[in-house]
Amino acid sequence: MTFPRPVPLIGDPTAASERAADPTGWAFPEAERESFHRVVAARRDVRRYRPDPVPADVLERVLTAAHAAPSVGHSQPWRFVVVTDPGVRDRAAVLTDAERLRQAAQLEPDAARRLLDLKLEGVRDAPLGVVVCCDRRTPAAGVLGRATYPDADLWSCAAAIQNLWLAARAEGLGTGWVTLFRPADLAALLGLPDGVETLGWLCLGWPDERPPAPGLERAGWSQRLPLADVVMTDRWAGAAPPPSALRGPDQPDVVAARDGGDRLLTPPGSLGVLDAAVDRAVALGRGEVAGGVLVLAAADHPVAARGVSAFDVRVTRDVTLAAVAGTAVGVTAARGAGLRSVVVDAGVAGGPVPGAVDARPAGPRGDLVDAPAMTADDTAALVAAGRALGREAGASGLVALGEVGVANTTVAAALACALLHVEPATVVGLGSGADSAMLARKAAVVTAALARAGRIEDPLTALAELGGPELAVLAGVALGAAEARAVVVVDGFAASLAALAAVQLETAVQACLVAGQRSRERGHELVLQALGCEPLLDLRLRAGEGVGAALAASLLLQGLAVRRTAARVDR
């Protein structure tokens, strides 16, 4: 049974089905498109103006177009100072004249003469000046999009200038962008407060010239490059692409998953983070999944001898034996979620664990401080073994990652420092049951381990030098499961670092990941950020063993069931 689609009374009233039926339906009519392109092609930097005034309504339309420009984080940092005072204009003209001579003095004589022959500004000619200013007093971190590109506010103002310029051309006005100013001089002339910067002076008025081509081009200063010379595909010309054997879901599959969610009788995205995880599973072709596999990898760590864990190393073996018996917390949680469990002995002290998959390293193990965690050969073999296991488990459609290992939060912190290039203080946490003295020992151990290993760029080297065998196995499982296009649900800090190593080896693995939870470990949030994954759960878990991944997998499977069975709209 289907229902009429609820149409929002505000916002976009169209449906995904309508947009799919006519992807070009948002286009303007052909005549309007042609007019726009004519305006763009006819934009010129005008230097000569008539004395006739610009009507107020025309000026308002032009400034309204500028104010409609895109701005990063909708910050609207532009401010427009409209100059009509002859005294201000005269002082500005003096500044441009002086700067023109200064710039000419820096050129070779022939180039200087050619520069002086050019008319570079119309400050005295134009009836109006418009100085576009950028109000930068809001901290970059406080504006969406500027934390990564702090100068995006200036780019937004440049977009406003382009809008103004095109709108003015459509009105028949001429515009000239003058930057023959020292910014501090122009700011002082206009009385700008600290933190407000100018992007130059725009001359605005009715043009006293009809340039058929850009002025500097006509003057032989330069020629417009062919489009083919400035367009490259995928990477800078000549740069080798990164090696990769895996691919994420195809773009049509990603869109189809989102479209499917839009057909439910509920507002799009109504399940929040869970909806995004369901979309990811559906895009991978796993919309029908109703179960999966928890891969629980276990290992002990020589670094435990340095007093960095509140628990005896025998606990690793006890938990692994309980997991094989089906009674450990992690496998119990997995069973409740409808997952079967595979337990991997990646190096548990006391000899092979009966009933576990044997993936024990053959070579020596180090304590991170005096020697590497594993040999390079063992690391490669563990990743390969995990990859084969991941391909097999991935046939189920969903693979959850969990780990067991006393002292592995210390190992994870060292590995996080290597993979993320951060300091120990940002990632070393208490782990389970530690106190402040133990925390200090952990920080000292991680610092010493990093000093021994040096800066590491390769994730396999990082695993060998500072990781653990269970994390190498899980990195391989993530790779193999991604090959099988399974959803990979990741547990806490240590398991997330295994997933991060896999992503650094094969970027497309990230498209298969779902972060199960945000643990209490200090460095986990940084790892989640690096993975670009928002967790489904935030329960302050410390259990390890894949508990968080199993609980999250249960939630994801319920979300997939909702997607399959909920009422649909008719279009």
Image (tube, rainbow, N blue to C red):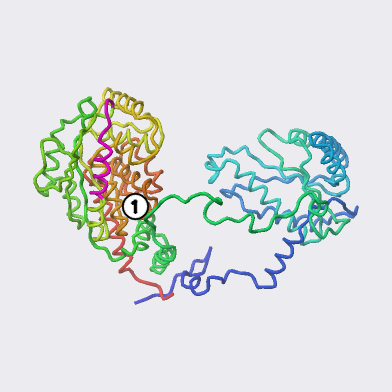
Q: Nearer the viewer, residue 534 or 55?
A: 534
Above or below, 344 against 234 in this view is: above
Rendered residue at 32%/46% (across/down): 499
Give the position of the C terminus as an image quadrant: bottom left
The x and y percentages for residue 250 are: 41, 63
Going by the image, does 44 lie left or right of 282? Answer: right
- x, y (%) of residue 153? 62, 44
Q: How many marks?
A: 1
Dividing the image into 4 quarters, which one contains the N terminus? bottom left
Q: Which of the 4 image quadrants contains residue 108? A: top right
Quadrant position of residue 43: bottom right
Instruction: Read off the magenta span.
Output: 369-386
Vertical position of residue 291 compared to residue 155: above or below: below
Depth order, front residue of 533/248: 248
Residue 373 magenta-highlighted: yes
Q: Amino acid at mark 1?
A: Leu
Q: Residues within 10 Å of mark 1 (few under 14, many from 20)?
A: many
- Considering the whole magenta stretch, tell me its main secondary structure: helix
Residue highlighted by disc 1: 513
Question: Of residues 117 and 110, which is closer to you in this image?
Answer: 110
Q: Tell me the SS state at disc 1.
A: strand
The reply, left or right, for residue 425 in relation to residue 310 is: right
Percent of width and height locating residue 170? 76, 62
| Percent coordinates x, y for residue 102 in the rendering | 81, 34
